[in-house]
Amino acid sequence: MAQKMQYEDDDGRVIADMNVAGAPWHDKAANFVDRQAREAERKKTMQEYNERMSAADARRYTFYALLAGLALTAALAIVWALLILFMTQVWFR
């Protein structure tokens, strides 16, 4: 069995106790129960979202995603155009 290395400047004192509540290694029994609960929740979530999207829904989501991207691009283009107009008509005179 592998033994821990002994450093010559190590006097065995604990500077900061890392066994704090909330850490994964703090309470092994609670960790096991939490792990089982998380696994059950994950399975339930996967069952809810395991249904495939219909072709019409996929087209609709794609259309609205493109529409959102185009709206954002248009808003930024308008702001850019207003900035150019401000700079040429007011600032640089």
Image (cartoon, rainbow, N blue to C red):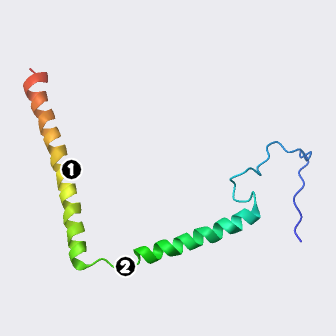
Give, as a three-letter code, the residue at label 1.
Answer: Leu
Density class for disc 2 (Cα within 10 Å; few <14, some 14-19, many ≥20) is few
Q: Quadrant of residue 36?
A: bottom right
Q: Nearer the viewer, residue 13 or 53?
A: 53
Q: Quadrant of the C terminus?
A: top left
Position above or below: 25 against 87: below
Mark toward the start of the polypeptide (2 vs 1): 2
Dot 2 amino acid type: Glu
Looking at the rendered structure, the secondary structure element under dot 2 is: loop
Q: Which mark is residue 51?
A: 2
Residue at image x 17%, y 55%?
Answer: 70
Mark number, residue 52: none
Q: Residue 80 location, x and y as percent?
A: 16, 39
Q: Is residue 51 above or below residue 9?
A: below
Q: Circle 1 is placed at which residue position?
A: 72
The answer to whether residue 61 is left or right of residue 84 is right
What's the residue at 89%, 46% (across, down)?
10
Structural distance between the alpha carbons of marks 2 and 1: 31 Å
Q: Quadrant of residue 79?
A: top left
Badge 1 marks a residue whose secondary structure is helix
Q: Residue 7 location in percent, x, y?
A: 88, 51
Which one is in front, 49 or 74? Answer: 49
